[in-house]
Amino acid sequence: MNHEDVLARAKADFICSCGRRHSTDINRIIISAGFIGPLIDLVRELAPGQAKVLLIADQNTWQAAGASIQERLSQSGIASPSIILPADPPLVPDEKAVFAVVNALESDVCLLVAVGSGTLNDLTRFVSHRVNKPYAIVATAPSMDGYASTVAALIINNMKQTVSAWGAAAILADPAVLAACPQVMIAAGLGDIIGKYSAICDWRLGGLIESEYICNTVAELVLDTVEQCRRQAPQAALRDESAVTGIFEALIMTGIAMSYVGNSRPASGSEHHLSHFWEMAFQRVGITPVLHGSKVGLATIMTCALYRNLLDLKPDFVRARELSGTFDQAAWEANMKEVYVDGADVIIQLEQTARKHDPQNVCRNLARIESNWDMICELARQAPEPSVIQDILSTVGGAIRPSELGISRELVAASLRHAMEMRDRYTVLRLYTDLGLGDLAVSLVENLFDNS
């Protein structure tokens, strides 16, 4: 994989063997110290006369790249007002942050430019879409896979939610800036990439159990990207510009995969649900958020352990069907209010439409699980051993135990039992729940870390 491969994928527009048309909104991907020239060209294309750009950064990314971008734009006669959001404590992509960006947006701005990574990208993407003005991204770290995404991950009504938006008009980055970012952000980027192992397993599991749309071409593209990226981990640990840029390109490629299918399924599964659960738990008690990719990498160790355990599992389908009939809606809602607190209403509303716990739906799923058990086990064989994920992450200094991210034993257990409630997607967490094996999932993960 190289820059040309990524650019070719971004510009592709084709009818796939899955029967769908795949394309992206991305017109430019520039990974070069000279990215400012193409950015200026884009601005002048959008506004041939008096151009104005809104730069959206935080205190750290402004120092890393924002100030120099503003100076270069000014030298080219392009006005570039800015909004510099706080970096400490870390920015939260909630309603308050969205309003801050909207309030800074002047009517004659022709382009929004996010200078930074995850949260800044989500905020800019969302606002760009809602005000119908294009946006570009100047990346400052290879820390997450949302650069090429068409959705925005926001905190709405105290709940992590994915909101439809659109892709960037341009993704720009300087390899030297990427390689100079904090090592933890490089590790987070690799963690986000490694999470695709379980995401693809979950996507295929959803196809088996709920007849969900699957594109094997996209799935294999993602897995090939992961394999290429993991081989660059030793060099990335040394801040080799080529290796760090390779991680960045892999992150863009998985974003392109999401654009191809129109949702985050090729890149987000149970490992992301666990990550989101931990993030919201931290926010409720005022704990500084941990980088998204760091949490995803750690969660992937857990989800791969759950998949590998299926190879030795002999499910008791009779018991599972009996348990499904004991579901108590009122007790479940009370539990959700205790677990999700002020975000519980969103969870309860989702259950009213998805009906994940409805005994009839669970029994339908159990019938499909039973008839497809051999294929499910084949999926489980495709998931790496947890020790393999740990080795990859430790190479770049990534977290491989919950305690390293301040995640308690109790929070791990709660997430394994309840993170599945956040999305209407079939994952390995729902598989264990449908089988009546939620306690087993918890004990497996606890033993994994107790013995490591």
Image (cartoon, rainbow, N blue to C red):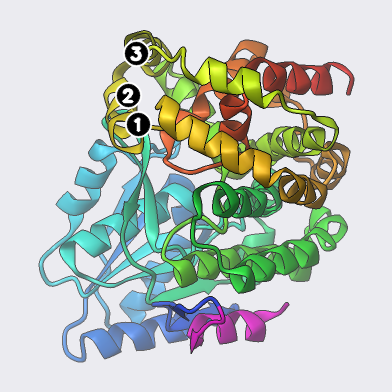
Label 2: which residue?
343
**Any magenta on residue 10?**
yes
Q: In which quarter of the image is residue 436?
A: top right
For marks 2 and 1 on the same chain, the one whose residue lies earlier in the sequence: 1
Q: Does the magenta stretch include residue 249?
A: no
Farthest left residue in view: 107
- Residue visible at 31% across and 61% down in the picture: 165
Residue 324: tell me if it is visible. Answer: yes
Q: Earlier in the sequence, mark 2 or mark 3?
A: 3
Q: Is residue 406 visible?
A: no
Mark 3 lies on residue: 337
Please name the amino acid that badge 2 sits on.
Answer: Gly
**Nearest to viewer (mark 1 / mark 3):** 3
**Quarter assignment of residue 136:** bottom left
Q: Do the residues labelled 2 and 1 touch (CB within 8 Å)?
A: yes
Q: Which of 256 and 176 is in front in this view?
A: 256
Q: Is residue 237 left or right of residue 349?
A: right
Give the quadrant of the N terminus: bottom right
Q: Which of 66 and 41 is in front in this view?
A: 41
The residue singled out by tag 1 in the image is 159
Give how far across and how far down residue 180 sits, in percent: 67, 57
Per the rendered image, the range of residues in magenta is 1-17
Amino acid type of the residue that numbered disc 3 sits on in the rendered structure: Lys
Residue 189 in the image: state x and y as whole percent: 65, 52
- Binning the other alpha carbons within 10 Å of mark 3 as few (below 14), some (14 to 19) or many (20 upward) gives some
Where residue 113 appears, x then y in whole percent? 35, 66
For the C terminus, which image quadrant?
top right
Helix or strand or loop: what does disc 3 sit on?
A: helix
Mark 1 vs mark 3: which is more N-terminal? 1
| Above-or-below relation of 423 to 236 | above
Q: Where is residue 192 in the image (x, y as percent from the top left)?
A: 63, 50
Q: What element carries label 1?
A: strand
